[in-house]
Image: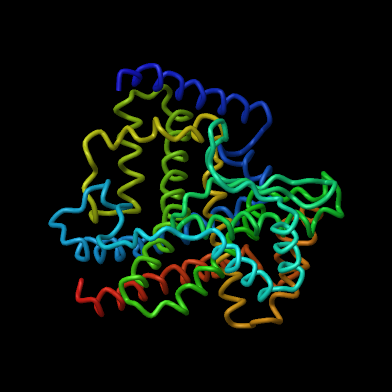
Amino acid sequence: LGAKKPLTFAFNMVLAGSKVGDEVRNYEHWVQRRNLANEIPDAVVDALVTACLDRSDILRRYLKLKKKAMGLKTMMSYDVWAPLPGASQRKQDYGEAMRMVAELFAETRPSFGKIAADMFDQHHVDVPPYQGKRGGAFCMPNMQGLPYVMLNWTGKARDVATLAHEFGHAVHMELSRKHGPMGSVESLVMAEVASVFMETLLYGKLLAKTKNPTQRLHILQEIIEDGFATTFRQMQFNRFESAVHNYRRDHGEMSTEKIAELYRDAEKDYFGNTMKPAPRAENFWMYVTHFVNVPGYVYAYCASYLVVLALYRRYQQEGESFLKGYEAMLAAGGSQAPAELLGALGVDWTDPGFWRGGLDVLDDYVKQFAATARELKLV
């Protein structure tokens, strides 16, 4: 907290610099520069923002359920992402995860299965953590052949989903490699589609085979809270960013207290009264480096995730016939704009109903959570 003054000053300077840069380039509003980089029309972003705020009831309904399931009188902000009691501590076996992921990819499309099998067979996966290795997980493109995946496998349940996620990137990279280093690079929104789609298929498979209600509840919690962190949480950040950029342009430099007030307002717009902010939680904006390093970036997380859920809903409705066109979309890489890629699948993302379709999938997960919690007599 001793850094409040320098951080407030630095943030104000970033906001002022953004204003000057936009004026020089004749941008009409603070996020137009980011929209152009993402190849997303302003109207599409506006539709995304509206759809998420309109359906923030999904988030609030879930948090009320979780509060009851955890036996809390008051839900604090640090409880929002806390695990439910009774979560399995069983370590996941990497060999078992390999088989599960290889099987999932082969069932989805033959080409996906071959790429996954080749990745394993040719040892293009760096699995365990070790001294000097960077944290997290990522997939690195390779214009000469198969991509490389780096993991830090510790056997957590989440690690299986991470493996499917990174292999989704690998499939996308390998299918689009023919376009070369420039044409294979997707826009920010489309770059996460293949990875999150495979992750979503994996969770669907796990839910279908999990009969134990306690295990099922914890899988649903993971799906829902990952989804909320990527959608409503990011759009809360987007709302805060919009507020501070516009305030700085209209009224000048802001105090720490004013920035905190705008952060609280954005948080309340999404969370309502479902949780009580922890002490000093209004200073969380200082932690999110995206606000300083990449202004306007955060909505792309939500856009990408909802594109996936909307496509997943299409897959549920159409089955195998959808996957052929989906594979062609991945193979196109960045050689076409996102609107063209999605348009080939009959998707119009200028239609607000498209974004609502993705949010409806999240709503379905919350309904399944509620039904399972009732079965366990937790709510």
Occupied quadrant, residue 317:
bottom right
Visible residue check, residue 307? no
Nearest the camera: 112 or 364?
A: 112
Q: Residue at x 35, y 65 (%)?
A: 218
The answer to whether 123 is drawn above or below residue 205 in the figure is: above
* Observer able to see residue 203: yes
In the rendered view, tell whether residue 187 sits above or below residue 89: above
Q: How far across and down, in percent of the image, does residue 166 sit?
A: 62, 54
**Which residue is situated farthest in the left direction here?**
73
Which residue is located at x 39 percent, y 22 percent?
8
Left or right: residue 177 versus residue 348 is right
206 sits to left or right of 215: right
The total of numbered circles placed on residues is 0
> Of residues 46 and 294, which is closer to you in this image?
294
Residue 15 in percent (x, y) is at 50, 27
Give the quadrant of the C terminus. Answer: bottom left
Residue under the point 40% across and 67% down: 219
Q: How is the image coloured?
A: rainbow
Quadrant occupied by the N terminus:
top left
Which percent across, then down, holds residue 169? Answer: 67, 55
The residue lying toward the viewer, choosing from 214 and 1, is: 214
**Residue in the picture at 61% in, 39% down:** 28
Residue nearest the viewer, comparing 345 with 35: 345
Image position of 106 with respect to 267: above or below = below
x and y percentages locating residue 310 in the rendered image: 57, 69
Image quadrant assignment for residue 354: bottom right
